[in-house]
Every structure is written in structure tokens, then in C-alpha cells.
């Protein structure tokens, strides 16, 4: 019998963050390979291209070869249960990505050694940093002619503002990639190419940090690596687990995902260094994972594959207690009961019925709209987990109906898509058309497509003149009312009736901030 404490302790829940093409899909495959989920490993790639091919609206994804939706993969490695949450990787990524990062305890950052830190990685990292999420770094594609490792580390430190601690160090690169030196075990693992390599059992190991055989074989590349290792170990701070756990230091590994080289070290680091599920803040109190009663929060809603049925899967991260299939839960927001007969887990990607699950695990709850983003489910206690972010949109479009008779369908569709978090819907103070807000352009395309295929509504999207939006609050309700009245033409209400100040030029915001010192302007709203 394992105790709840054991189950919590062996959970690792993380996401991979990267810029498109850095190698996230490839690395995911190799991680699954180690976890023994081989039949799946080969299919991750296929999934990338044709994920949810059964769903019509996902055509967009197929056409553009990108992932619109995220998913969850659970695997076992050593004595740990690892939950890997996929984050959509396209540059037009949506708000979904951000929210997925609120459900993990650590992140694995994959960097293309040739390109260094790229824009999307930076954005995702901001979210991690805001939450002090610990980050492990994998510098990929060392089998290519890439940047010098020192240069890449420098770049990570300066752009991310986070010290790096090398755990492995590469010997050569590209055609001359000799392998990596493990600085803790003080040994070199010799590189072997091969896409289908399963494991590391037959890898060649050269012991020590000054191995005669290695010097002979890799010559100047080995010497260069030795020099660099001396340099970094002198210049950089030693690994400090507390600093890592606080998101203030990142361990770095070099390798080549496609050759399954250096991947095992990363997986071991996840097990050895990354934290198990910790306490999670709720409005009312802090919730410990080891508490006996179940609680969890919905961080993602995905429309199901069958548009006709309009069912959705709510992805819930368990915060505390034990989930048992069939248990009755309470949706705290609505007070409604939720029965959990056919809840899904994601073990090895087979969407099997889950019997039980533990803190850190993700379960999928099929429903028809009773669950919303940010919903907390408990065994009865009134708890509302905080921290699920809604970001102020950066792109705006006005929706126009091709057929005015369909306005009811449009409203229903947009309400539901808004609840899923696919898009943010605003209603302006003075009435008139609905305004849509997004972080990525692709969100508009997905919404237009889904409105057409799922709700039978043809729409036209027209550019709106806004550049920014800021949620407004004030400690003084009268002042807020005055502000709203004085700015009626620029106020819109979001789906939860939160007043939002629509900004045409950035300077307008500055002016408003100066003129209304008692009003706060927020770029992010937390679900409440
Ligand atoms: P994603 O967009 O981040 O999921 O990236 P993918 O895993 O699809 O990889 C993008 C491209 O880089 C693919 O063509 C991969 O085959 C290639 N790739 C991934 N890892 C490596 C590597 O270690 N070395 C080399 N040379 N190519 C790689």
C-alpha cells in the first residue's frame, strides 16, 4: 500500500517550452521512449501533423502543420509518474499556452543551439518567471554546426536574467560532435548517431574529466571543452537546488534529441531535481497536496472532436486528495454537483477511464458546458484556486454576421467559445457589435472556422482600431463608476462583466493613468 504522501512525492508534472522547430516534438518522443511507451513514441510525430484529424475544425491545424490544441501525456519512469503537458508551439500561439503553464510544477526549455533564445521561448518564460516555475534547459541539435556553447549560455543568462549551471558539456559539434561530458559524474558519454536508438545501455563511457583516450580521439575539441569547463566552473555559481526551485537558476544539458543523445540525462534531472506537486493558493487558504480531501482546478477546456454533440473536455489538475472514479464533486462556482463516471486519464495517450489519480495528475472531465475555465472542484468545501491568468488581448476584431437572422447562434457560439478560452468576447458599453480579443492571430481563424462548422454561422471579421485593452479596477467604487461614465465610448465588458478600457494608442493609456490616479489598469486578470 502506498500512501498519499508517496503518490505525491513520485509525481512530476511539467511542460516543454520552446520556439517552433527547436525540437519539442522530437524530444517528447524520446522521453516517451524511455518511459517504455514506445508504440506511442513513433506516433507523436504523426500526431503533430494530423492531431485530431477526426475533427473538422482541426483541419486548420492539419493545413498549417501546427498544433492548435494541447494534450497531456502520462508516463512512468524510474519510480516516478511523469505528466507531460503539451504546449502549442506555433508563433501564433494562443492564450491556452499560458494557462497550461499554470498547471505544471516545472518546465523544460528546449533551445535550438543554432538559434539561441527565440521570441516565443521568451514569452513563455515570462509566464514561468512570474510564477517562479523551475526551469531545466536542454540545448538541442549539437550534431549540427551551431553556436559556441559559451555564447549560448551567455545569451540565456542575459535574455532570461537567470544564471545557468551546466550539468553536461559538449565536446565539439556538428560533424565533430564527440559527445557530452557529465560534470557531476565526471565522465564522457561518446556520441553515436541514430534516429531509432532506443537507449543508452550500449553507449561508450570514458571516465574522468581528463581521459587519455578521449584526448587522443577528440583532440582539440576535447581540450577546448576542458578549457571551457574550467572557465564555467570558475565563473558560474554552483548548483543550488533552492535557487533552481525558486526559478532563479537553470541547470543546462546539451544533446541531440533526434539522435536520442543527452535525453536520458534530462529525464533523470526531471526526476531528481524537479519538484513534486506543492501547495497551491486558493482565495480562502493554501491547499496542501497531502490533504485527504480532493480538490482541483480546470485550466483548459477543449471542445471535443464531435461538433454535433458540443461536448467538451475540461482538463483538471488535481491539487489535493485522491480522485476516485465515480466520486461526486462540487463545482464551487455554481454549487452544482458533478458526477465523475467517465473521467479520462492520459496514461500513454490511451484515453482510458481513470480509476484513481493523485495530486499533480491531470484528468479529463467530459461535460456539456457545466465546467468553465478556472473552475475549482472539491468534495464540498468552498475553495477557489487563484492564478489562472487571462491576458489582455493584443489583437482585436469586430464580428459581423453575414446573415443577420443568425444573431442568436452567433451569441451562443461566441459565449461557448469564450468560456472555453478560445477567444475573449467584449460587449461595448454603448452597444453595437461584439468585439473579439486575442493574443494570437490564429485564434480568430479558429473561431471563424468553428462558428461556421459547429454553429452554422458565417461571419466577417473586421479590424478594430484598438491596440490594447486594460481591465480597470479601483478601491473606490464611485471613482470606478465615474471613470466608466466619463469614458463610455471606450469601455467594454468582458464575459464575466469585468469593465475593460479599450486603448487606441498607447499614449491614451498614459494619459488616462495620469488623469485617474485612483484607477488601476491591469494587463492580466486572474480568474476569480
Ligand atoms: P518542434 O516544432 O519544436 O516540435 O520541433 P520538431 O521536433 O518537429 O523538430 C524540428 C526539426 O528539427 C525536425 O526536422 C527535426 O527532425 C529536427 N531535429 C530535432 N532534433 C534534432 C537534433 O537533435 N538534431 C538535428 N540535426 N535535427 C533535429
Image (cartoon, rainbow, N blue to C red):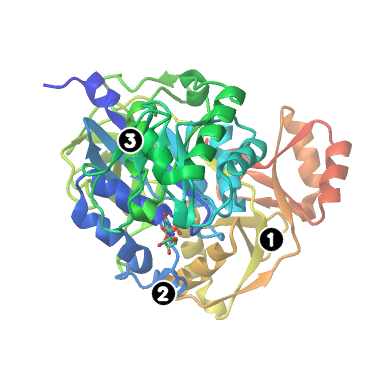
- Cα gap from disc 1 to disc 3, whole angstroms: 72 Å
- The residue that appears at 64% across and 53% down in the rendered structure is 393
- The nearer-to-camera label among 1 and 2 is 2
Residue 172 appears in the rendering? yes
For mark 1, what is the residue? 431
Whether label 2 lies within 8 Å of ligand 1 gets the answer no
Q: Nearer the viewer, residue 420 or 59?
A: 59
- Answer with mark 1 or mark 3, whichever residue precedes in sequence: 3
Residue 313 appears in the rendering? no
Q: Is residue 422 left or right of residue 434?
A: left
- The residue that appears at 58% across and 57% down in the rendered structure is 425
- The residue that appears at 84% across and 36% down in the rendered structure is 516
* Residue 428 in the image, given as x and y percentages of width and height: 68, 57
The local secondary structure at tag 1 comes to loop
For mark 2, what is the residue? 453
For mark 3, what is the residue? 206
Q: Nearer the viewer, residue 365 or 154?
A: 154
- Pointer 2 local density, CA inside 10 Å: few below 14, some 14–19, many at least 20: some
Give the quarter the ligand 1 occupies.
bottom left
Counting every numbered tag in the picture gives 3
- The residue that appears at 83% across and 46% down in the rendered structure is 486
Q: Do the residues labelled 2 and 3 touch (CB within 8 Å)?
A: no
- Pointer 3 local density, CA inside 10 Å: few below 14, some 14–19, many at least 20: some
- The nearer-to-camera label among 2 and 3 is 3
- Answer with mark 2 or mark 3, whichever residue precedes in sequence: 3
Q: In this view, does 397 lie to the left or right of 467?
A: left
* Residue 343 in the image, given as x and y percentages of width and height: 22, 45
The local secondary structure at tag 3 comes to strand
- Which label was assigned to residue 87? none
Q: In this view, does 68 lie above or below 201?
A: below
The local secondary structure at tag 2 comes to helix
Whether label 3 lies within 8 Å of ligand 1 gets the answer no
Amino acid at each position: 500500500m502506498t500512501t498519499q504522501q508517496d503518490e505525491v512525492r513520485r509525481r512530476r508534472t511539467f511542460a516543454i517550452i520552446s520556439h517552433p522547430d527547436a525540437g519539442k516534438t522530437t524530444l517528447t518522443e524520446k522521453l516517451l521512449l524511455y518511459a517504455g511507451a514506445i508504440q506511442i513514441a513513433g506516433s507523436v510525430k504523426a500526431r503533430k501533423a494530423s492531431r485530431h484529424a477526426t475533427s473538422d475544425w482541426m483541419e486548420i491545424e492539419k493545413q498549417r502543420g501546427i498544433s492548435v490544441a494541447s494534450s497531456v501525456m502520462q508516463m512512468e519512469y524510474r519510480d516516478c509518474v511523469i505528466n507531460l503537458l503539451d504546449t502549442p508551439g506555433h508563433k501564433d500561439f494562443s492564450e491556452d499556452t499560458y494557462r497550461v503553464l499554470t498547471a505544471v510544477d516545472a518546465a523544460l526549455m528546449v533551445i535550438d543551439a543554432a538559434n539561441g533564445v527565440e521570441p516565443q521561448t521568451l514569452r513563455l518564460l515570462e509566464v514561468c518567471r512570474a510564477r517562479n516555475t523551475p526551469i531545466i534547459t536542454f540545448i538541442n541539435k549539437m550534431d549540427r554546426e551551431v553556436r559556441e556553447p559559451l555564447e549560448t549560455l551567455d545569451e540565456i543568462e542575459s535574455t532570461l536574467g537567470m544564471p545557468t549551471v551546466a550539468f553536461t558539456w559538449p565536446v565539439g559539434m556538428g560533424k565533430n560532435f564527440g559527445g557530452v561530458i557529465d560534470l557531476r559524474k565526471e565522465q564522457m558519454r561518446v556520441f553515436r548517431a541514430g534516429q531509432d536508438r532506443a537507449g543508452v545501455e550500449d553507449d561508450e563511457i570514458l571516465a574522468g574529466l581528463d581521459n587519455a583516450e578521449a584526448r587522443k580521439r577528440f583532440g582539440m575539441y576535447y581540450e577546448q571543452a576542458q578549457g571551457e569547463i574550467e572557465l564555467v566552473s570558475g565563473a558560474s555559481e554552483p548548483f543550488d537546488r533552492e535557487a533552481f526551485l525558486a526559478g532563479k537558476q537553470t541547470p543546462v544539458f546539451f544533446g541531440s534529441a533526434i539522435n536520442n543523445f543527452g535525453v536520458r540525462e534530462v529525464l533523470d534531472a526531471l526526476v531528481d531535481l524537479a519538484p513534486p506537486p506543492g501547495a497551491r493558493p486558493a482565495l480562502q487558504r493554501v491547499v496542501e497536496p497531502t490533504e485527504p480531501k480532493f480538490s482541483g482546478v480546470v485550466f483548459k477546456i477543449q471542445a471535443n472532436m464531435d461538433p454535433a454533440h458540443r461536448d467538451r473536455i475540461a482538463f483538471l489538475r488535481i491539487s489535493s486528495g485522491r480522485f476516485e472514479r465515480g466520486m461526486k464533486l462540487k463545482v464551487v462556482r455554481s454549487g452544482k454537483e458533478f458526477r465523475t463516471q467517465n473521467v479520462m486519464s492520459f496514461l500513454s495517450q490511451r484515453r482510458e477511464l481513470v480509476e484513481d489519480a493523485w495530486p499533480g495528475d491531470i484528468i479529463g472531465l467530459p461535460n456539456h458546458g457545466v465546467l468553465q475555465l478556472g473552475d475549482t472542484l472539491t468534495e464540498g468545501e468552498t475553495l477557489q484556486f487563484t492564478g489562472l491568468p487571462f491576458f489582455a488581448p493584443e489583437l482585436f476584431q469586430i464580428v459581423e454576421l453575414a446573415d443577420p437572422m443568425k444573431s442568436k447562434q452567433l451569441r451562443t457560439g461566441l459565449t461557448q467559445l469564450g468560456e472555453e478560452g478560445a477567444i475573449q468576447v467584449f460587449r461595448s458599453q454603448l452597444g453595437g457589435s461584439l468585439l473579439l480579443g486575442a493574443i494570437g492571430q490564429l485564434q480568430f481563424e479558429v473561431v471563424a472556422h468553428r462558428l461556421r462548422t459547429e454553429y452554422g454561422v458565417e461571419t466577417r471579421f473586421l479590424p478594430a482600431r484598438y491596440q490594447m485593452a486594460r481591465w480597470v479596477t479601483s478601491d473606490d467604487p464611485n471613482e470606478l463608476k465615474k471613470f466608466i461614465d466619463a469614458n463610455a465610448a471606450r469601455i467594454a465588458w468582458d464575459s464575466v462583466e469585468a469593465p475593460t478600457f479599450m486603448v487606441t494608442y498607447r499614449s491614451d493609456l498614459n494619459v488616462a493613468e495620469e488623469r485617474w490616479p485612483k484607477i488601476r489598469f491591469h494587463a492580466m486578470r486572474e480568474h476569480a
